[in-house]
Amino acid sequence: MSVCVFLNSILSVGAQSMQMLSLLTLQKSGTQTIQVLVAGEALDANQVQITVPGCGAMLLLGSSDTQLSYSCDFPAEVPSGTYLVTVSVPEKTLQQRVLFTSTVPVAAAQVKDQPTPAEGLIQPQTVIEPEVINPVKELYPVENVVPVVKKRVITPVENATIVAIPTVLQKIPVKKIVQSVIKKTEAPKLTYTGNIKPLKFAEITLPSTTVSKTTVKIVGNPEGAWNSMWEKINLVPKAQAQFLSIPMIIVIDPTDPQFKKYIEQSSGSKKTVDFGMIHEKKPLTKGEQIMVITLGILATGGTLAMAAPIVFIEGTTGVIEFLKSITGMKPLENIIKGGGGFGGQQLLGAGAEGGGAIIPQGQAVIQSGIISTIIAGIGTLILGSTSSLKQRSKGGDGGGRSSGDGCGGNAVGNNTTSVLSNLFRGQTPKASELINFALQQGWKLLKSETGPRKFFDENGIERMTIKHGSPRTPGSESPHISIKNTQGKLIDPCGNQVKQKDPDNHIPIIWDL
Amino acid sequence: MEPYYRLPSFEEVYLEDSWVRDINATNHYAEILVDTVLTEKNPQYTKPKPNEQYCYKNGKIFFSGPLKVKWIKKIMKPIPPYPGEEITYGNIDSFFYDKNCYKLKGSWGELEIISQEPPKFEFV
């Protein structure tokens, strides 16, 4: 039996959720039990989110009106140390209920009022100086609730439950807690969660916690990948966030063949980007238009089993391989199409400290204030910043165009490709627009009576072929183009070389000739 | 002028997006090796491989004993291949015939072939 020591708990309040944070000291890997005690009215387990970094799968063992029990499986590779346990529920819920706290079983009742980590373990270094508020008056309008002050019940037997109820409620930013408490982590490791079936891409479970400053090394054509992953999101009223208690972010599985192909196509340069710095420069606010970048899926199901967000503890450097997409969010769209498996919700973005963005059906919701660990974790993956880039449109009028190139910088320095990529960004271009584009480049049109329209540059290179397509075989039924660069290599609109048989060499257009 | 797919053995291939791998043309013989797009009705049709637009199979278009084979325009400049990819010379953009005169055109050039016997398509 491993020893878990409940240290203390901190309840924090945000605009969208309330949190209780406590510390868990892990001596050995294995299954740990975490209990959440509820005072006041019963709390629906589905409204509770609980996270523990390093926990491979969090399963709800059982629930009653006053207690929720979870099983947390710590893989062997998770180092011993002190970890932050976060329990959060929507604020609306808490206003109708009251205090709750967290306990963990202990092997020996040696817990005192102050935490006593086992020898050799990392000492928690919580240095929070919270703003003390009156919990009853300010947070709990329910009259029949009596807050318990400075009371701990310790049962001096093995596997006893230690109950602790915070004496004060504290407004503290998640970031501050994390930075002061968590000292250890390990590099992210991809594993599949058993309770969530992957779509085309996979979910991941990683040792994780929340940090707001993360250094991520991007590998594989970052110049081309960076901007292509950004999207502009129109924020929607905060009220809609209430319906989004199940956050998700999208995982790019580096083992996915499609992903591998893109990475293989990417060669050469590497780049290190400090996500946290970007965050700190531009906190998200309601009503703001933001760009988001999506790196992974976080999903919490009804059982609260979850794929933890990809997060790296401060001071470590994790490697995230960016998906390179010729049309910006193409792989992401694949996932969205299959989103029903995740309840139809996609969380595409989240903000920096104190904010998160949830996007149902292409819209974003900003959560302000102190947010849950889960959301904060996403915030380390999905960055917010201002942008003039347009959101990709599906159907309708195409949604307009962007002033960006849509190719993540691949097109930078190559005006031809940049202009061309803009034609494809956010909509399917018309054949006439492509012809105009080609003529503007000074390319010569060669149109035979029986063949496709072909454009040649001044060096005789066949730069663009516009084909009407044919219903004779699947895949050819719609108009499409093929593009070559100045060397005659087949490329996509962003200038990336593509294979002859690749769908990316078969770029759909609208026929209006 | 009739399109190639009216010819026997060409009904279920789609040459406009097929890739020419090589052309062997002499005065009395013409053979075009093609990584061929198959239509759904082709007996050898299978679902396209991942990351491929069509179902492709290697085949050849050949004229046995043509009366005349003429390069109207010969380019045969290979498309710089993607690493690991086979060299090809482009698509068959058009392939029409009128009686015994067959005209094929693509990025690789233009061929005019006079033949009593119609060309055949075979998988290789």
Image: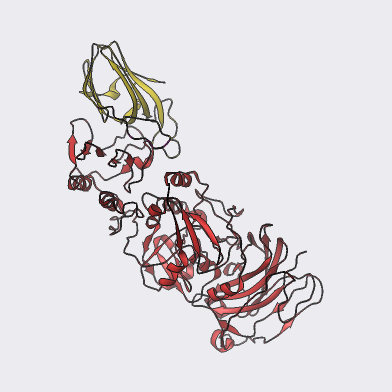
Picture residue at 23% right of the left edge, 46% below the top = A434
Among the chains pictured, the one given red colouring is A
Q: Is residue A482 above or below residue A396?
A: above
Asked if residue A368 shows in the view, the reply is yes
Q: Position of residue A340 (x, y in %)?
A: 48, 54
The quarter in which the N terminus of chain A is drawn is bottom right
Q: Quadrant of residue A449?
A: top left
In this image, A485 relative to A439: left or right?
Answer: right
Q: Which residues are magenta?
A: B75-83
Q: Is residue A83 magenta?
A: no
Q: Residue at x 45, y 47 (%)?
A: A263
* Quadrant showing the C terminus of chain A: top left
In the shown orientation, is residue A52 left or right of residue A317? right
**Residue A249 showing in the rendered view:** no
Residue A188 in the image, given as x and y percentages of width and height: 57, 57
Residue B38, image x, y percentages: 38, 29
Way the structure is coloured = by chain
